[in-house]
Amino acid sequence: MVFTTLMSPAASPRASESVVAHPLSLATVRSAFLASLGCVVPTAAYAHSFATPYVLPVPFWMYVYGCVATLVVSFAVFTYFLSAPILAPTVHTLELGATSVTRTATRWALRLLRAGAVGSLVLVIVAGLVGTRNPGRNINMILFWIVFLLGFTYVTLIVGDLYALINPWKVIIQWLERLGANLSTPRLTYPQRIGYWPALWFYMILIWIELFALPSPFVLSLVLITYGLITIAGVVLLGKDVWFERCDFLSVFFRLVATLAPVEYPHSSNDDTPRIRIRPPCAGVMNERPEHISLVLFVLFMLSSTTYDAIYRTMLWVGLYWRPLLALLQPLWGTDLAKAQSMLADGYIVYQRGGLLLSPALYFALYLLALWFARMASTLRVKLRTLAMDFAYSLIPIAFAYNFTHYYPMLVAECRDVVRIVNDPLGLGWTVLNRVSLDVETPPLEMAVVWHIQVAVILIGHVVSVYVAHRIAMRTFPTRRQVTISQLPLLLLMVAYTATGLWILSLPLVQ
């Protein structure tokens, strides 16, 4: 992404790039037509956060070779040392003591966090309604898109599903219940066959807004108000438990990320004093399993949406549309590129939107193909649907790694501007922090550090996924030979994901 060069600092991480959804300039058409020829074998890494390329110290193919070799060696090590079939998952956990002091401290800490969550939601909505329309000066943009959607996601990796305890919508519902409203009793029976489809649809709508809607504080506030009304209506009809478990996409998203965390909060009858349990990292992805195919697609969309965000503004992706059509339909306009642009612009919008909608279907097809080969190679008689749900959570480490590598440079860069935003949160000329110097220049991020951290995180994410998939296979297949053979197609899929992820990060963007 060229977030820091195209838009103001606090704009949406994806919505800031929506400029390409509109008719392109002649220079853009020419650049997409010509530059796409030379971006197949890049010699510089762009890391999708900055316009300035970083010349790699070694050829790009060596990075790919090293990562692929690491995956293959890791697979060989796991195969050699992890051989005995697992009959049932066992997790060694440690539950923190619940003395009167710790219960009191937990209760007050939770109250403060819930009040802070609700206060932040109110601030985001009010700032968008009454504050400046400039996305770079309104606190609601950086608070929602950067601090919450990015920062809190990475915090969840450490603290677990804290969002389930401080979800501001759920807290508001609880407050309404204390005032006498009955929102826990469902008025309608939720069909089990629907599964998590509502959460997936809401998630896709959010990504659509991020990618293709202009970054506007006012629009963000309207979206949050609308979703709040939908949440209240959903809770009234379906009940609080069903809505926040299956329909609220943020609850589903953070619950999936929390499967990687070493902390969990078991369900308790008392929400004010939750139990806290320590467990091995990634225990959730190895021992939990989606109960509906829609949750498998949710996981795949976590992966495909980030990948699509990384590629849809590259010269390669833009050129895939413009280059063949300009050549094929040239007799219609000759050398008049302005006419070509006006005739093809609407199709380009459909091309960009359609790519996002089709991305999870493509990933799902590749995933099923790998599992089909695994089933055929192992000669295990089991439904493909069953295997798809068994191994779905093994992709969560990859999805998290892609999210982090794609967005962490932006998170660091934009959070350094927090002091300026807090000084004038609504963009109305306030000086809340008038004693703080706002003229201190922060040094730019080192592209070498950015690139090598991205390479390392992608590699670690894939190695963890290979390990998780192998552990799941030990529980699914009865013999060591079947475990090993079944994992070869999935290993090839992981290798393909790794190479593709590094390649996309190195592609130059259309400016």
Image (tube, helix red, strand yellow):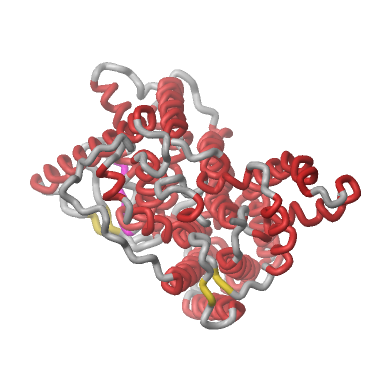
Relative image position of residue 310 (x, y in whole percent): 57, 57
Q: Which residues are magenta?
A: 262-267
What secondary structure is the stretch in magenta mostly built from? loop
Q: Quadrant of residue 191?
A: top right
Q: Is residue 115 above or below residue 499?
A: above
Relative image position of residue 420 (x, y in whole percent): 29, 48
Along the line of sight, which residue is nearer the eye, 276 or 87? 276
Along the line of sight, which residue is nearer the eye, 130 or 101? 130
Q: Quadrant of residue 509?
A: bottom right
Along the line of sight, which residue is nearer the eye, 275 or 88? 275
Q: Quadrant of residue 342?
A: top right
Q: Is residue 263 magenta?
A: yes
Does residue 161 appear to the left or right of 482 in the view shown? left
Does residue 9 appear to the left or right of 374 in the view shown? left
Relative image position of residue 206 (x, y in whole percent): 51, 39
Task: Determine the residue positioned at 11% across, 42% down.
Answer: 104
Q: Is residue 429 above or below residue 308?
A: above
